[in-house]
Image (cartoon, rainbow, N blue to C red):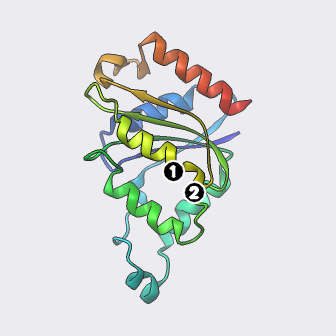
Amino acid sequence: MKVLAFAASSSRQSINKQLAIHVASKINNAEVELLDLNDYEMPIYSSDRENASGIPEQAQRFFAKITEADAIVISFAEHNGTYTAAYKNIFDWASRIDMKVYQNKAAILLATSPGPGGAKSVLSKATDSAPYFALNVKASISVPSFYDNFDMQKEQVTHSEIIDQINTAINGLVA
């Protein structure tokens, strides 16, 4: 199984990146490819830009990575209750290739934050909108208070309930 994993964040020290890597690494017999959204940076989407220059090569590469994957693990950072500008722009450009950006791929959606909210607002938006963009969500998990529930040295979740949720999500993904 080829798994595409990424944080919906452009932060180089993203806690969502750490969470996505952790969860993807627990999928047995998977070839995991980690994407960095910084590799897909492009001008802010506008129809004027699209009409003048077409769809940027970075959006086409992002879409192709999804095409090549069997499953996807995304961990969403939350900026002001919603998606990061970096993710939203890449997504907007990719949706111009095909509205079904995620091409019916099975997915685990995650979100975390340093605070007790666990980025639940953005996770809810992503989960609720997934069917419109052909994302087959097998599970969505919010990890609150990241630094209390993730061991930075061992690079793993430490809270037993969250570990159980992750294991259940992985079982649902590979079933």
Left or right placement of residue 79 versus residue 39 in this view: left
SS at mark 1 in the image: helix
Which amino acid does the dot numbered 2 rest on?
Answer: Phe
In the displayed structure, 133 sits above or below 139; it is below
Q: Residue 27 appears at what percent x and percent y? A: 62, 28
SS at mark 2 in the image: helix
Q: Quadrant of residue 117?
A: top left
Residue matched to label 2: 133
In the image, farthest residue toward the bottom: 52
The quarter of the rendered structure image containing the C terminus is top right
The residue depicted at 42 percent of the width and 13 percent of the height is 159
Left or right placement of residue 131 versus residue 57 in this view: right
Q: Residue 22 appears at what percent x and percent y? A: 48, 28
The residue depicted at 31 percent of the width and 32 percent of the height is 113
Q: Quadrant of residue 43?
A: bottom left
Label 2 crowd bin: few (<14), some (14–19), many (20+), radius 10 Å: some
In the displayed structure, 69 sits above or below 124; it is below
Which amino acid does the dot numbered 1 rest on?
Answer: Ser
The quarter of the rendered structure image containing the N terminus is top right
Label 1 crowd bin: few (<14), some (14–19), many (20+), radius 10 Å: few
Q: Residue 106 appears at what percent x and percent y? A: 65, 42
Residue matched to label 1: 129
In the image, farthest residue toward the top: 160
Q: How far apart, in angstroms, are the residues tagged by discs 1 and 2?
A: 7 Å
Kindly indicate whether the residue at mark 2 contacts the one at mark 1 (C-beta within 8 angstroms).
yes
The residue depicted at 54 percent of the width and 64 percent of the height is 61
The residue depicted at 67 percent of the width and 51 percent of the height is 104
Q: Residue 6 appears at what percent x and percent y? A: 47, 44
